[in-house]
Image (cartoon, grey):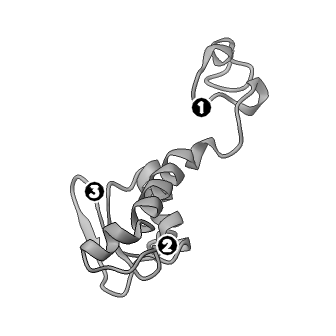
Amino acid sequence: MSQGGDDELNAMAAVTGKPLGFGGISGRLEATGRGVVYGIREFCNDRALMDSIGLKPGLEGKRVVIQGFGNVGYHTAKFLSESGARVVAISEHNSAVFAADGLDPDARER
């Protein structure tokens, strides 16, 4: 048997991360990061709450910091950026980057 492929007997028992061939769904990889963004979006769309802290409703122009840049952190940063927020810092367990003008989550080291 192969290591973790669609023909893996134990893949049929998987609950999360199930291969598409065994009933998994497209979008699973980014689902948690997208869910984080949905929660942040709802929080930022609460007009009374935003008024109480002196901010305008919505994600547009909000500056955000991402803690951790694994699968969830990457997709959170990507979807927040696509929603108009500006990712200004990303931290990991051993380092961090900051750019006041914003960071591109898809930028690669050159």
Question: Identity of the amino acid at label 1?
Answer: Gly
- The structure residue drawn at horizontal position 56% and vertical position 46%, both measured from the top left corner, is 31
Q: Is residue 22 above or below residue 76?
A: above
Mark 2 and mark 1 lie on one chain; the one further toward the N terminus is 1
Count of numbered tags: 3
Which residue is labeled 2 in the image? 81
Q: Secondary structure at mark 1?
A: loop
Name the secondary structure under disc 3: loop
Q: Secondary structure at mark 2?
A: helix
- Three-letter amino acid code of the residue under disc 3: Glu
Q: Nearer the viewer, mark 3 or mark 2?
A: 2
Residue 92: mark in rendering: 3
Identity, as a three-letter code, of the amino acid under mark 2: Ser
- 7 lies left or right of 51: right
Q: CA distance from mark 3 to mark 2?
A: 19 Å
Residues tagged 1 and 3 counted as in contact (Cβ below 8 A): no
Q: Residues within 10 Å of mark 2 (few under 14, many from 20)?
A: many
Q: Nearer the viewer, mark 2 or mark 1?
A: 2
10 Å neighbourhood of mark 3: few (<14), some, or many (≥20)?
Answer: few
Disc 1/disc 3 C-alpha distance (Å): 24 Å
Q: Nearer the viewer, mark 1 or mark 3?
A: 1
Residue plotted at (62% across, 25% down):
4
Can residue 89 be seen? no
Residue 17 — which label?
Answer: 1
For the point 41% across and 50% down, the residue is 70
| N-terminal label among 3 and 2 | 2
Residue 90 in the image: x percent, y percent?
32, 66
